[in-house]
Image: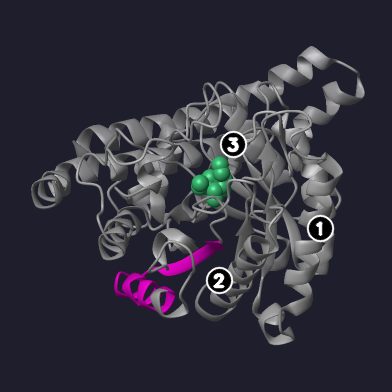
Amino acid sequence: MSHHFGKMRTAGLEYLKAAFSGEAVERAIDITGRFCVEVPGWQLWNGFGGGGRFEGGGSGGAARTTAEIAEDIGLIHRLTDSTPTVGQHILWFFSKNGIEGDYGEARRVSEELEEHGLRMGSISPTYFLAGSEDGSFTSQKADIRRRYIDQTILGAEIAAGLANGILTLWYPDGTNYPGQRFLPDKISLMKECFEEFWGSLPDRTKEGLDRVLVEYKVFEPGTYSTTVPDWGTSRELSHIMGDKGGVLVDMGHHHHGTNIEQIVGTLITFGVRGGFHFNTRYAADDDHSVQADYGMSKLFFELLSGDVVFNTDPSKNWVYALDQMARTEQRIPSVLKSIDALKRSIARAALVDTAALRKPQTELDMIGANVEFERALLHADTTPIVLESYERKGLHPDPLAAYYESGYQREIEKKRG
Ligand code: PSV
Ligand code: MN
């Protein structure tokens, strides 16, 4: 097995050096090896979140507890050296009653993660469980709004006190029919709750936060409207948090055909603090594991050329997380496959010869420019770069193959059912 990877790697690297340049390939190997992504705890879980929209049905030895989630992501990190942090949903993982979060529970989860060499990553208040039928921050009931504001304050305290300071906010608020609610009322309530949350947060907690990202979604669960449907609305709300506020872009939250890389390029240009949720969608927000497709490579080109991946000023970097949920697939292979797809894509982006692009661009040769762009972003097979990046770290060159060889999958299926 390793012998086969060895040949592919060396012959492939020679080809890539001839097609691009030795320097470009070296840069791509370095970048690919260093790229890390947060894994959402819920992806490994067999509970509510693990089922996505279809509760239950945990399959293939999915984790039953937060301790098992930590164990599984710990293994993924040992295989890839690329997943040091774990994303958390407050009511899924830090709650005793499914209604309120609990700081003590969060501390327990963070200790479990540390035992496996991991750290707590972004904290998401959970706005979409019981009580959110008329929305969370936009519910007509003041006590419901209060409950969600309190959960957001707790989320900020957990992010600042136990995790990496990243708070990510996604709201299920919206309507199914025109006239169901007055739309300006919904966004006004949203804004007021943000002001109340931020206004009542102690300075000490604010200082401990790295950023507060507002995620948008053009549809679902609202079928007629969602209250935060686009990056403009996210941006407006994020201003309330001053220089801590930012925008979270999730691949699956747009209409089909939306030019997501342009949104990203625009946000970077305006210096907006950002975050990204990676997944692949076919029909809608179906949260599949990541495919190394043209869209993913174009996106990484914007992120790399916008200097928000490895900027020496960490505050300029965007934060990167997977956001996928699987009901029927084996969880660990699904995450490993996503990591592989991200690495293949960032490697392609690193191979783009931006200097060579200038000539056709200035000569208004749009086809010439497109051909040069696609030479790397669409046609380059970056498998050898990814293999080499792991090999240089002393790891198995293909973490997914290493996982299948390890027997772990059989073990957890037997143990967890
Ligand atoms: C909503 O669809 C979303 O993308 C948000 O990021 C949530 O936190 C996550 O999925 C899990 O439901
Ligand atoms: Mn998301």
x then y, percent, for residue 247? 73, 52
Q: Which residue is mark 1?
A: 191
Residue 79 visible from this viewpoint = yes
142 part of magenta stretch: no
Q: Amino acid at mark 3?
A: Pro
**Identity of the residue furthest to the bottom in this view:** 204
Q: Amino acid at mark 1?
A: Lys
Q: Nearer the viewer, residue 12 or 104?
A: 104
Q: Nearer the viewer, residue 249 or 307?
A: 249
Q: Which residue is mark 3?
A: 221
Rendered image coloring scheme:
one colour
Which one is earlier in the sequence, the residue at label 3 or at label 1?
A: 1
SS at badge 2: loop
Crowding at dot 3, Cα within 10 Å, few <14 / some 14-19 / many 20+, comes out as: some
Crowding at dot 2, Cα within 10 Å, few <14 / some 14-19 / many 20+, comes out as: some
Q: Is residue 125 above or below residue 106?
A: above
Q: Which residue is mark 2?
A: 164
Which one is earlier in the sequence, the residue at label 1 or at label 2?
A: 2
119 part of magenta stretch: yes
Residue 312 visible from this viewpoint = no
Tell me the CA gap for discs 3 and 1.
20 Å
x then y, percent, for residue 264? 74, 41
- Over which residues does the magenta segment extend? 106-124
x then y, percent, for residue 191? 81, 58
Image point 77% across, 70% down: which residue? 196
Image point 70% across, 33% down: which residue? 260
